[in-house]
Image: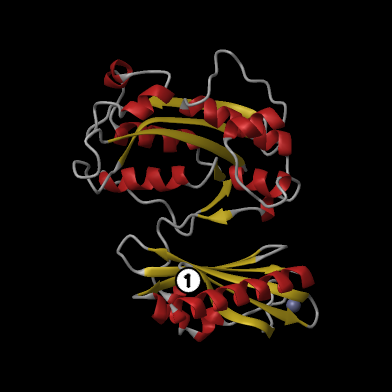
Amino acid sequence: MNYIIFDLEWNQCCGGRDMENPRMPFEIIEIGAVKLDKKFNIIDTYSSIIKPKLYKKLQPHIKTILNYDESTLRKGRPFDMVYREFIKWCGQDDYIFGTWGSMDLNILQTNMDYYYLKPMPVPLKFYNVQQIYADMYDEDGKIVKLKKAVEHLKIEVEEDKPFHSAVNDAYYTGLVLKAMSPRDLADRYCYDIYNNPKDKKDEIISHHKHYLEHISREYHCKEEAISDIDLMAPICYRCGKKLAPKVKWFANTPNSYTCIGKCWHHGLVSGKIRFKQSRNNNIFVIKTMVPTDKKGLEAMKERQDELRIRRQTKRHN
Ligand SMILES: [Zn+2]
């Protein structure tokens, strides 16, 4: 199987939000990619400039980052033509996408929808190389910019390959993946949520070695989601058995709930649900269950107390 590591550059409307087309707020102007074999060696490169249809003038901030200007874009080709060529280049063989962050797949599909192109298969697995790097090298799993990862891994930055060109960023992302060469890469996949599950039968439950992820169907509102007993059941990330509650679900932030429970075989497990808005303004939920320890339990109890006190003071004032 090959890895297709791709990167996009996009432009947005110079006239701000009021002037932009809501069907395509970010317009792709460049697709760049490298194809890696199973040992992460680069075996092919793809690069194309896209002639914009909506936003022909580069937004000032984007213009300062890019290594080219509008005159280059005018020589580009239409998106649908480039996209079809790119997908053909990806190959007939089995491949999986990899990107630095999760934005690129989202923007790509928005642009595909704008041109009414055939959607990507669902569910769509990919590797978020930025997150894999964070999980492997940052204690708190915090994400960093590509340049920082390249410097940290002592990857040579070539003079004729500056950052912020799609093909070069894809090239460095490929080199980062090779430098990391995670043995358990197969377990580090994630799912794209642009086309989130609509119904119960489409829900995604993925079992990883160290966590469990559940991407739910759509609900009309948060209340409907949290009243779904199946969704809210705190279960063990490893054996799937129901946990004995230690801290029941509580709203940790406006958009997330957390809980902790205990599995008699696998110890303390922490749960989190995050509410996401689907493109048709419904709600769906990403639930994760991960192992934790006594320290994690104490921290969560403290957090719960802190929120309780804050609520009480608010009421008294
Ligand atoms: Zn268990």
Residue toward you, 15 or 311: 311
Q: Does residue 167 lie above or below 284 as drawn?
A: above
Residue drawn where x is 30% and y is 48% of the image: 113
Point out the image quarter for the C terminus.
Answer: bottom left
Residue 238 visible at all: no
Point out the image quarter for the N terminus.
Answer: top right
Residue lying furthest front in this view? 317
Residue toward you, 298 or 117: 298
Residue drawn where x is 65% and y is 30% of the image: 150
**Residue type at numbered disc 1:** Ser
Residue toward you, 116 or 157: 157
Q: Does residue 175 lie above or below 289 as drawn?
A: above
Measured as percent of width and height from the top left, residue 72 is found at 33, 17
Callout 1: SS: strand
Residue toward you, 89 or 145: 145
Ligand 1 image position (quadrant): bottom right
Residue drawn where x is 65% and y is 34% of the image: 149
Residue drawn where x is 67% and y is 65% of the image: 211
What number of labels is visible? 1
Measured as percent of width and height from the top left, residue 277 is found at 38, 63
Q: Is residue 201 left or right of residue 128?
A: left
Query: Residue 19 lies in what quarter of the image?
Result: top left
Q: Residues within 10 Å of mark 1 (few under 14, many from 20)?
A: many
Residue 56 visible at all: yes
Measured as percent of width and height from the top left, residue 291 is found at 73, 68
Residue lying furthest top in this view? 159
| Colour basis | secondary structure
Residue lying furthest left in this view? 19
Measured as percent of width and height from the top left, residue 285 is found at 47, 69
| Residue that numbered label 1 is attached to | 216
Q: Is residue 167 left or right of residue 78?
A: right
